[in-house]
């Protein structure tokens, strides 16, 4: 998956999990990766190749692990959550 796609997903996920206490450990781990992804996606900063992008990539990996899904070509945080529900055999609450 391309870096910019991962950056977009990390940025989207940040707001989705920000107020959710069950994600507090992931939030702490991504204390740099989440805001870097958001800044990069919104043209607030340029995330440099190397360590800057590594922070975002690490958070992306933690999101995959936390959701219990394999790496793949995901378009959005929402899609990753849907795949997680499917993998776990759960009903997706957003599908009503």
Image (tube, rainbow, N blue to C red):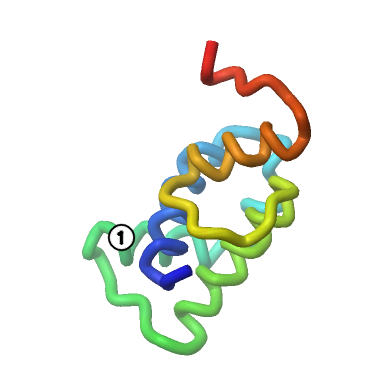
Instruction: Give the residue drawn at x 63%, y 33%.
Output: 20
> Which residue is tagged 1?
41
Instruction: Give the residue drawn at x 46%, y 78%.
Output: 53
Q: Position of residue 48 (x, y in %)?
A: 37, 84
Instruction: Give the residue drawn at x 77%, y 35%.
Output: 88
Q: Is residue 96 found left or right of 46 in the rendered image?
A: right
In the displayed structure, 19 sits above or below 5; it is above
The picture quadrant where one finds residue 36 is bottom left
User: Furthest-top residue in view?
Assistant: 96
Q: Position of residue 52 (x, y in %)?
A: 46, 80
Q: Position of residue 51 (x, y in %)?
A: 51, 85
The picture quadrant where one finds residue 83 is top right
Asked whether residue 28 is in view, the answer is no
Asked whether residue 81 is in view, the answer is yes
Camera-side residue: 65 or 19?
Answer: 65
Q: Is residue 44 found left or right of 79 in the rendered image?
A: left
Instruction: Give the residue drawn at x 56%, y 59%.
Output: 72
Camera-side residue: 89 or 44?
Answer: 89
Label 1 Cα neighbours within 10 Å, binned few <14 / some 14-19 / many ≥20: many
Q: Position of residue 38 (x, y in %)?
A: 37, 57
């Amino acid at each position: 998956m391309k870096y910019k796609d991962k950056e977009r997903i990390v940025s989207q996920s940040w707001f989705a999990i920000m107020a959710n206490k069950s994600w507090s450990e992931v939030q702490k781990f991504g204390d740099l990766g989440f805001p870097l992804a958001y800044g990069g996606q919104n043209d607030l900063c340029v995330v440099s190749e190397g360590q800057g992008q590594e922070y975002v990539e690490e958070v992306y990996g933690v999101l995959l692990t936390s959701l219990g899904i394999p790496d793949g070509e995901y378009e959005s945080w929402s899609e990753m959550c849907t795949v997680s529900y499917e993998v776990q055999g759960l009903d997706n609450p957003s599908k009503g």
